[in-house]
Image: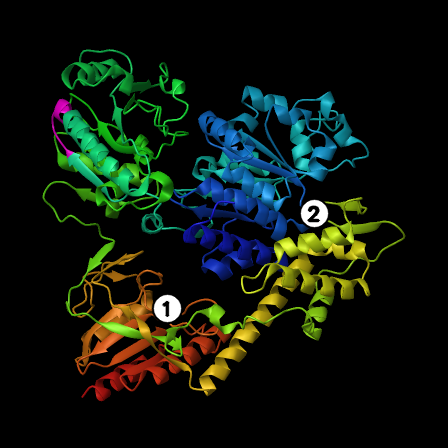
Amino acid sequence: MLDLKNYQRHCIEELREFLAESRAQGDPDIAFYRRTHEKYRDLHGDPKVPFVCVRVPTGGGKTLIASHAVALAFEHYLLEKQEAGLVLWLVPTDAIRSQTLAQLRNRTHPYRETLDHFFSSRVRVMDIVEARALKPSDVTENVCVVVTTLASIRREDTEGLKIYAQNGSLMEHFRGVEDRNLFKTEDGLVIQSLANVIRMHRPLVILDEGHNAQTELSVDVIASFLPSCIIEFTATPLQGSNILVSIPAIQLKQEEMVKIPIHLENITQWQEAVRRAKEKRDELEQITKKNEKETKEYIRPLLLLQAEIEQEREDKVHVHLLVDFLTDELQIPREEIAIKTGKEDELSAHTNLLSRKCPVRYIITCNALKEGWDCSFAYALVSASNMGTRLSVEQIIGRVLRLPYAKRKSQEALNRSYVFTSSRRFDDAAKAVVEGLSQNGYSKHDVIRSDGSEQRTDYEAVRACSKENFSLPLLAIDGQPLDFYDLIPEDFSLHGSEVPLSFLEELENQATLIDIQEDAVTVEAQQRLKLLLLSEDETKDALIRWISRTVREQAIAINDMNAFLTDVLEKLLQKYSLETLFMQKFSLRDSLRRLVDTLVSGQAEETFKRLLEQGRITPSTSESWRVPMDMTLLQPQQEPFQKHLFDRCDELNAEEMIFAKQLDACDAVDWWLRNVVQDSDGFFIQGYRSARFYPDFIVRTTKGAWWILEYKGADRIGSTDTTYKEHIGEIWASACGKANAFRMVTAENMATIIAEIRSNSA
């Protein structure tokens, strides 16, 4: 499977925890509030059905995250479906529907590979027309993904009418079905329709570009299919969305996904704007040739040209006027130009724009590239108009944002994108570009105006208080930087480990274990009582293989893990039947994951304490954290500070802001820094947990001492996490010498901490 970026993993982890807690609590409201501290909005009429939004800017791989979300929903929330059922994947346009279908059907594409991996290739992908021939076994034995537009399931749409109509091909789905909450005729008879089949199976709904679906009518249509869970993916959520996780655009840049910042240049005459854009494209192509010699990466920069209208008119910059200007005035070969509009599609002849054999370097459109089109070779966009009026560049600006091969280039010019406009006023052009960025999940912070203003974005912070080189020690083992997995001995093995009584008690306390009655079991599912039998494939070995695939730990060799899990399952089979364990396999999996984590973490803590007693936990002699000269911020803070090391500060909550102002006013403070939680920039303390600890504040006093401070709100005081961080922080300070101090700061003691810093620097 395709390796995930850190922010994609974050989205997936947030979804996993939300779905698991929604299942455990039986209430998404509670789970949502615990994760976000925001009010949960019931958007669909059923407060017990999770409906959350994942916000990822354009270019961030929303569809890849959505593919993982399907697996998460079945693994952590829709447990009674036993990894089989119906997914209704709703997209905004036919263009995106065709693209998504092709990607999900292609077994070598990362989206399909993800689904096949989690569901052992038991995946069927179809459009709404193919779904009319759906068989009962398709849904009970596979995960069936139906990709369609929201419009196609509305009754007023021609296709929509068909899914509500009687369909003899679906008769088998209705044999023995109780008269439940299904669509009926005026005579009260259940309609044997695709709409009713979907309702029976209570689908998982994936909303691509979900902001297009949040009208009252659209929400009602989705709710009418009785979804079991709804997950929305969009770059621009509406105000009413339950935003579970929101990824700032700067993280996409840090993870080498997008070409930002955008350089904006406005030239009043459209001909000169096109000429300047052509020069930039040529310049970039020369740079890519140098890049190819270093990296073997082939890039052919594309220039997108947005015409004012498609049809020919003397007072407008139409498509063929641009073609003529490119060929006649700029001497560009016609084969390097492709038209992509509603009426003309010369791009379809070039099935692979990334190929060396493809000659296309210029693509002329109006709005045809708005959605459903992506090519990472698109570097520049020029919007042309001989009227001097603002064009809707916001419609296609997202097409130039993706970074080729999702990898940062050594030449900075190739890490940026370029927009050229032809407006009489620069501010009008800037407003259009910012609007386009906002529609793609970006902001004005991602734009550099080529008008003589400062050439950096608001996300980029530079030193303001001191230009000196500073460094802080890291914890180490015998002088070598400490890594969590250094705390797990090479001979450590789970095989033969005692299974603690708490693990067995945890299993007992899960949803009531199933009592076997002869050869069948009856389970209370969310929607109805369902009779389940073990199939021929559901053997002891199959259960062990499934558990082994879903319970992994980097510190444990696969063979050792398999042997341990086999031992545990053999012991459980002495008490529970195989049918019971299969029915509880998700609870069993989660319990085993926690058990493995407990055993590995326990070993790490034991090793750490032994090394500490032996005096082998020391400051690193080979590596330290060097305070950078510049820093990228995820959430730039506008508050002006006098002593913050950089000219901009990362986000502070209300209580942290109060403390920051006190630090800033303290005469004993030379400078202070709001630490960032980023592997590349932030200072961290590695302890005996796998996750690094990034303290909130770094303070340098006038006497040259270091104070590392972690702020905790009242709701976190006394928690296990807070206790661990305080313990590890104090170990770091003790190991690194008297000039280094660590304190846990709260609303109650912040004045005391400030006084302590002042007195120790007097």
Q: Is residue 402 above or below residue 242?
A: above
The region drawn magenta spans 266-272
Q: Position of residue 225 (x, y in %)?
A: 62, 36
- According to the picture, the residue beneath numbered tag 2 turns out to be 82
Q: What amino acid type is highlighted by mark number 2?
A: Gln
Q: Residue placed farthest to the front in the image?
A: 293
Whole-percent x, y for residue 344 in the image:
35, 14
- State whether residue 360 appears in this view: yes
Left or right: residue 137 compared with residue 129: right
The kind of secondary structure element at disc 2 is: loop
Q: Residue at x 81, y 65 (%)?
A: 575
Name the element at disc 1. loop
Q: Which residue is mark 1?
A: 694
Measuring from the top left, give residue 21's x and y in whole percent.
58, 58
Q: Is residue 268 left or right of residue 296?
A: left
Magenta stretch contains residue 271: yes
- Residue at position x 54%, y 73% from top? 489
Q: How is the image coloured?
A: rainbow
**Residue 711, image quadrant:** bottom left
Q: 356 and 590: which one is in front?
A: 356
Rendered location of residue 491, percent (x, y):
58, 72
Q: Residue at x 36, y 69 (%)?
A: 684
The amino acid type, in three-letter code, at marker 1 is: Tyr
Choose top left, top right, bottom left or bottom right for residue 531. top right
In the rendered image, the quadrant that contains the C terminus is: bottom left
Nearer to me, 472 or 701: 472
